[in-house]
Image: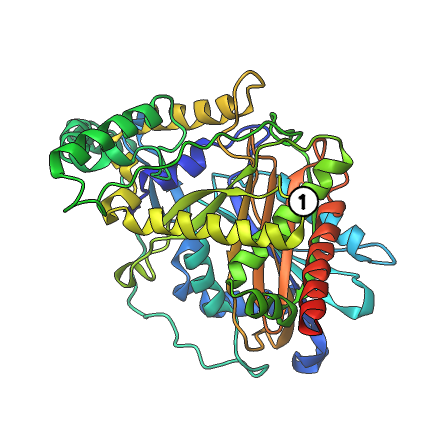
Amino acid sequence: MRQLTGLDTQFLAIESDTTVGHVGGLAIFDPATAPGGRFGIAEVRAMLQERLHLLPPLRWTLVPVPFGLDRPYWKDDPHFDLDFHVRELALPAPGDDEQLAEQVARIASRRLDRARPLWELYVIHGLAGGRVAVQTKMHHAMIDGMSGAEIMGILFDLAPEGRDIEPPPADQAPEVAPGTLEMLGRGVAALPLYPVRALRAVPTTLPYLDVAPSIFGLPGAEPISRTASRLRRRLLGSDEHDGEVVERPKMRAPRVPFSGTISPHRRFVFGSMPLADIKRVKNHFGVTVNDVVVTLCAGAVREWLVAHDALPEAPLLAQIPVSVRTDEQIGTYGNRISVMIVPIPTHVAEPQDRLAATHDAMRAAKERHRALPAEALQDVTNFIPPAINARAARVVLQLGANPALRPLFNLIISNVPGPPIPLYLAGAKLEANYPVSVIADGAGLNITVLSYLDSVDVGIICDREQMPDVQRVLDGMQGELDALLALCEAEAHA
């Protein structure tokens, strides 16, 4: 068995009647390249069965520690049933993108069954043009973006013919899970270790409580962090050790229509933009692809807020995930992430000025992030007892949605570079791959971008009741890109 980290456990703890903890994707396939043009549940199931031994998380199920005395464990499910996890459905005619998005939102809104391995896969037929969609759901406690890409590398092939897969070891014995009494004993034995871990971690952790991903937002984290940071700066000396402790700017998120308590219902929209257009803007203005993507998000959200007479004077704050997975941690799954909280220039009126402001904000955030010691980017909640950690995670979300308080951040933006080469699943060619991510109380909007081949695929998920017209945000991203391209064209001919 392997034990979950504190951050993994938090993704379990935040789930409620309105909040889910899984991430996933919507992949669109052309079955014409598959053997005999057949691509359905039988072909997908056969491919998964062949590769299950290479994908340990697909068989993991949770083993809780009694009374929450310690973090839970993963173990192989002795009753694993692949048929339960792989499902099939069809859209009614005409099978357009709006119908597909609605179906994806329904599936994404439902929590996973914790009595089984925490993933599901849906093969969706009936799309226009004979295409087939595959929607995946996998709990965030099991994977982050990088480990999700590792799973993708095992499932997908570089040619329709697939590749040879080594069979599983013949002498692999089934895992025997400990009983309740043994798990209780493990929990009791772990309790004295938490204060010891805390004492060891305090000197290096306190100055960074307000940026560590699993503690960020806890009541009192920011003042404690700033006090410890100033004290350490004075003790170490600002000249010699200035890079070790970085003063973080005080940023406060304004309240906007998607800052409240979310409902159980989701709305999802998806679309693609040419990667070449984004690179043209990047090259013309001397910025990064990520700068352009964040600017597109800022411009689109600004337009939505203006349309709803809800544009604040201050910039919105975006949570941007950052991987801290080392080479040694490849293949270990779970979560190895940190976050940057970045002001995005929704308060800036002109696209070119928004791009410049985004570039400056992203550069400053990256400099602060690089200056943090490695231990501050690891899972510092490993020294907090799980019952306390779980309760604190729920309290943070509730505080963020409290209308009397400012939210911790307003939305989540994630830009993930994907493969520039064609991929195939069970012989069918992948045409597009749209991310389907998560939202939470206080941050009811998530824009995730994944590049593939010559396109940038965008998946936007939000609370249905807060943003029923979220399609406007997707259209606004294209409008922002068109405006930046027009500037490139005008300056090229000036």
98 on left or right of 124: right
Quarter of the image holding residue 262?
Answer: top right
- Looking at the figure, which quarter contains the C terminus? bottom right
Identify residue type, mark 1.
Answer: Ala
Placement of 453 over or under 142, stated as above or below: below
Residue drawn 19% across the image and 35% down it: 233
465 on left or right of 78: right
Q: Nearer the viewer, residue 76 or 414?
A: 414
On the image, numbered disc 1 is attached to which residue?
A: 349
Residue drawn 41% across the image and 58% down it: 147
Instruction: Give percent across and percent down for residue 275.
Output: 62, 69
Q: Nearer the viewer, residue 87 or 203?
A: 203
Residue drawn 24% across the image and 41% down it: 245
Instruction: Give percent across and percent down for residue 38.
Output: 70, 75
Tally the numbered discs: 1
Residue drawn 59% across the image and 44% down it: 446
Instruction: Give percent across and percent down for residue 134.
Output: 64, 60
Q: Nearer the viewer, residue 452 or 84?
A: 452
